[in-house]
Each structure stands twice: as C-alpha cells, then as structure tokens.
Amino acid sequence: MKFRFILLFIFPFCFSKIKADAAPKFHESVNIQLFSEQRPFSKVDSISALVFAVSNYPAIARLNSTTAEFWTGPSLHKTENGYQIFTHEDLSAFKVIIFLRGMKYESEVLSRFPGNQLYYLEVKDGKLKDVSPPFHQDMGTYFMFLLLTLFVEVLLGLIFFTKYKPLRSLKDYLFSFIAINIITHVALWYTYSHAPFPLFFLEIFVFMIESFYWQLYFRADFFKSLLYSFVTNITSWIIGGIVSFFI
C-alpha cells in the first residue's frame, strides 16, 4: 500500500521533469512557400518580411532576400522550395510582402506558435493568403510520427492488455486504443500549432486521458492506469525524439 502511494507522487514528478526539459522552443527558422493558382513558385521580383518579437508590436526587423545578418540578427534566405526567415530571437509573428510582375502582394500579420515551422502563402485576390497545412508542418512528417506513435504505443499496450483478456477482446483493444491515440495525437499537434499552450501541459493532458482509458475501459485500478499510460507515452516520446534528431 505504501508503495502505491509513492507511485502516485513519483510518476507525475518524473513525467513533468522529462517533459519540461524536452519541451522544444521556437525553431530558428520559418519556411515559407509561395503559391499561385495552387501551384508553388519561388521566383519573385523582390520579397521582404516584417518580423515581430511580440504580435502586433512594431517590427524588430525588415528583411529582404539580400539581407545577410544570420549571425547578428534575423535574415531572409532563398531556398529551393521558397524562402526561410532565420532568427535567434523568439519570432512570434511576421508579415510577408512580395513584388511579382510589378504587383505588390502583402500577407496579414501571421501569428506563430512554437509548433509552427511551415507556411504556405497563395497569391489570391490581390493578397497573400495563408493556406498553410493544419499543423504548419510537412504532412508527410506528421503522418510518419503518427504511425510511429501508433506502432509503439499499441505494441506496448498489448503487454498490459493481456491482463484483461476476459474483459475485452483483442479486436476491441486494437480499435479503441488506436482511436484514442489518433484523437489525442491530432488534438495535441493541432493545439500546439494554433494556441500558446506549453507543450508540457498538452502532454500531461494526453497522459491523463490515456490513463482514464485504461481505468474506464479496462477497469484497471488508478495506479496501474497511470503506470500503463506513463510507460506507453514516455517510450513513444523517447523514440520520437531519437527519430527527430536524425531527420
């Protein structure tokens, strides 16, 4: 009994320490791809960007494609697929202005959250419209991490599921656990890309939701539910971190 009470305090503490240390900050670059009639292009007469330290505050820098201040401040560079804004500051908002065939196109102020790295801007109705992917990430990368999460957590969960075979079938387990993982994964990535919530709190939310899953669906006791959720999530996070390091 004493051991269970110790677990109650150790699990949240360890989880929070690992997650807090691992929570990423803003990326040092923002990738911008330009589109016209849904087709990408990168050749413009000129391009500049207004970079904001805090949304709606005066710009801290006005950049153009010839700016070369990478080591001293923000800079804008042409890439194979578009442009990149590099900055060593926390870039919370920016505005892009291009001149194309003598016409000026300007975007709205684009808010940026730590999960955002990729923006698609389309020339439409005299403006640059934000038509970015839902997570502001390459969708191929997102689905890779989703499949990795499902593989790791469902496989590990099978070990815990064997204790509850009389209560639920393997089919029930696979369907329900895959569904709960897809829902929490999509919710975390979407929220992290559209709201200023710290990753730590979002991860704790996922951790608790999945522990409730074991408790309610399989009638596991409270401490076992925490243990199952902790093991599956921390293993998935570690493997995902290793994969992220190499891509």
Image (cartoon, helix red, strand yellow):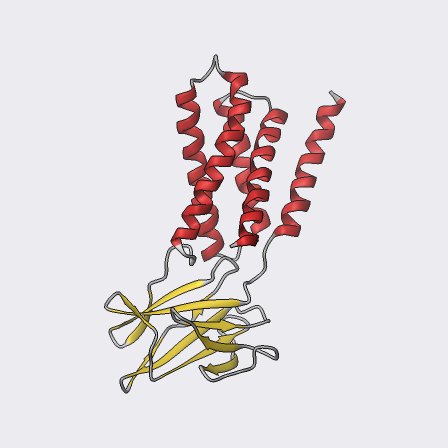
Left or right placement of residue 45 versus residue 190 in this view: left
- Asked which quadrant contains residue 46, the reply is bottom left
- Asked which quadrant contains residue 182, the reply is top left
- Seen as rendered, the residue at the extreme bottom is 102
Left or right placement of residue 121 versus residue 6 in this view: left
Residue 116 or residue 1, whichever sits in front:
116
Residue 107 location (% of width, % of height): 36, 74
Residue 176 location (% of width, % of height): 42, 28
Residue 160 or residue 11, whichever sits in front:
160
Residue 11 location (% of width, % of height): 67, 35
Residue 139, placed above or below residue 212: below
Q: Residue at x 55, y 40 (%)?
A: 236
Q: Residue at x 72, y 27 (%)?
A: 5
Report the label total.
0
Q: Residue at x 49, y 40 (%)?
A: 149
Which quarter of the figure is the N terminus placed in?
top right
Left or right placement of residue 19 versus residue 44 in this view: right
- Seen as rendered, the residue at the extreme right is 2
Residue 221, placed above or below residue 210: above
Q: Residue at x 55, y 24 (%)?
A: 159
- Seen as rendered, the residue at the extreme top is 166
Residue 107, placed above or below residue 102: above
